[in-house]
Amino acid sequence: MSESSPPLLSRRWKVILSVAILAHLTAVFAPPMAFQSRGPRGLSPSVATLLDPLASYGQMLYLDRGYAFFAPDPGPSHLITVEIDDPASTDADANRSPAEVRRFPSLNDQWPRLLYHRHFMLAEFLNDSYQPALPIEAASLVGPDLPAEELRQWRLGRKRYEAIVGSMTKHAVSRIAGGPGKVVKINRVEHLIPDFVGFTTRNVPLNEADSYITLEDFPITLETLLGSRPESLPQPGFTEPVPAPTGEPAKTGEPISNEKAANDSRDSKENLTNESETTEAKTESTVDGEAAP
């Protein structure tokens, strides 16, 4: 009679591995549950209690990625266009169209779907890392309104974006343009999704040409950098006829300037004040039994 072989794992190790597997599965399902349970008042308390102990673990394994793209109402997606041109023709006419424009990702070029998804993630990564260039006068604004550390972070973000674009451009020159000697430019493109009304009434296709918008790389302005807005804006003059309150015919004429409009408004307020004082005086005279003048 042969003796039974000992178990490969003891009961203790089975319990430990079972708990570890359950914890990992919970870390996988917790971020989507948190997204679905989020409401106007914030995250669900029960889901937040479940997610807190696994937050660091999920961040380490990239399990807490955003799920908004796969939601019922996703936002716009971002793509990359690679413009390839000859340097001689580019110098001759800067406004001419490039010789070749390729869009990434593309269902015609990237196959299987995993390759398409990787190119799509590269395009989204480039858009997420975008940082506009700072104006030359930004360094002179360092002070209470613009700390030096914030300015340094802006510049580091811009250098990071330029490094990413430079790396992608270098790769495009060697793998797409066929080697040095061609001018390669990478553009960010935002693909808008048609709204429900346009899709149902006009049957707008998802790949409509107008839904692709090229995102230009413009330097940020000083007002945007400081988060300031003009306190007052000049008001335009009125040229359209305005009906008179007494029923008189509408008058049309030359445009009303800001100064004239302000004077008219002040005169109108003074007339209303005088009429109100006269009415009060008449009312007091009537109450006292005297004849009103």
Image (cartoon, rainbow, N blue to C red):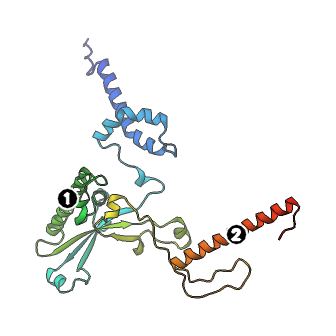
The answer to whether 240 appears left or right of 50 in the picture is: right
Disc nearest the viewer among 2 and 1: 2
Q: Earlier in the sequence, mark 2 or mark 1?
A: 1
Q: Residue at x 18, y 59 (%)?
A: 163
Quarter assignment of residue 267: bottom right
**Amino acid at dot 1:** Lys
> Horizontal and vertical percent for residue 55?
35, 37
Query: What separation in Å lies between label 2 and label 1 (alpha carbons)?
Result: 66 Å
In the depicted view, which residue is nearer to us: 238 or 210? Answer: 238
Quarter assignment of residue 75: bottom left
Q: Which residue is disc 1 drawn over? A: 159
Q: Residues within 10 Å of mark 1 (few under 14, many from 20)?
A: some
Residue 238's place in the image compared with 142, above or below, is below
Q: Residue at x 31, y 70 (%)?
A: 216
- Quarter of the rendering occupied by the C terminus: bottom right
> Horizontal and vertical percent for residue 209?
40, 75
In the depicted view, which residue is nearer to us: 282 or 72? Answer: 282
Asked if labels 1 and 2 touch by Cβ distance under 8 angstroms, the answer is no
Q: Secondary structure under badge 2?
A: helix
The answer to whether 44 appears left or right of 152 in the picture is: right
> Horizontal and vertical percent for residue 83?
24, 74
Q: Which residue is disc 2 drawn over? A: 274
**Amino acid at dot 2:** Asn
- Quarter of the rendering occupied by the N terminus: top left
Q: Residue furthest left?
A: 180
Quarter assignment of residue 242: bottom right
In the depicted view, which residue is nearer to us: 258 or 75? Answer: 258
> Horizontal and vertical percent for residue 100?
24, 77
Q: Secondary structure under badge 1?
A: helix
Q: Kindly identify which numbered label has been placed on residue 279.
A: none
